[in-house]
Amino acid sequence: MKKTILTFGLISGAISSLVMVVVVPFADRIGFDRGPVIGYTSIVLSFLLVFFGIRSYRDNVGNGQITFLKAFAVGISITLISCVCYVVTWEVVYYNFLPDFWDKYGAHLVEKLRAAGASPAAIEAKLQEVAKYKELYKNPLLNAVLTFIEPFPIGLVITLISALVLRRKPQSQQEQSPLPAS
């Protein structure tokens, strides 16, 4: 079980991490509105490995059979490994290559609010909110927790769906016998 979980978890984590590393340097050109779409799409694609990991475990280790709970355990383990890879990548990228992330994001939000005709009070409130997040993200532990909760719910949903779809209960002895009962 460990080999399957590690293999599929690390591949899933590598996919989401690779996309992050490729997209983040171009965040200004991509835009803060399109960035999350690309990011969450890559997260969903990386979590397809949860499905394939459960199926691989069922077919290769479970002899074609797996209970929902075992499938869920395999899937959530793959999800956790993938999320940890995502968090570690973000921590490295954020602290080493994005020192002005919150300033740029705040400027983007202010620009959107001004274009929408927001009041100066609304703009100031949004700037205060951005300042709070900027302060929170200075703490690596809080940064890690907030980053972890980006992909984890998606992985949880994909794990639940995959475990439901892929579960196969063991057949009873009578059902397995190719000869008809007399």
Image: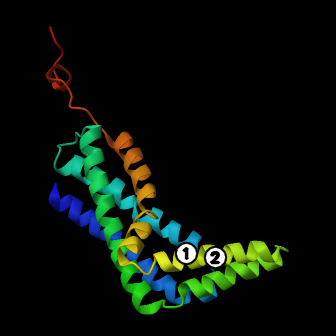
- Image quarter of residue 143: bottom left
The reply to whether residue 157 is visible in this rendering is yes
Residue 132 got which mark? 1
Q: In the rendered image, which quarter contains the C terminus?
A: top left
* Label annotation for residue 128: 2
Does residue 34 appear anywhere in the picture? no
How packed mark 1 is, by other alpha carbons closer than 10 Å (few <14, some 14-19, many 20 or more), is: few
Residue drawn at the location 24% of the way across and 40% of the way down: 66
Image disc number at residue 59 = none
Question: What kind of element bears circle 1?
Answer: helix
Can you give x and y, in whole percent of width and height, for residue 167 in the image? 31, 39
Q: Give the colouring mode of the picture.
A: rainbow
- Residue at the image position 75 percent from the left and 82 percent from the top: 111
Give the amino acid at mark 2. Answer: Gln
Residue at position x 44%, y 55% from top? 153
From the viewer's perspective, is residue 92 above or below residue 34? below
Direction from residue 177 to residue 119 in the image, left or right = right
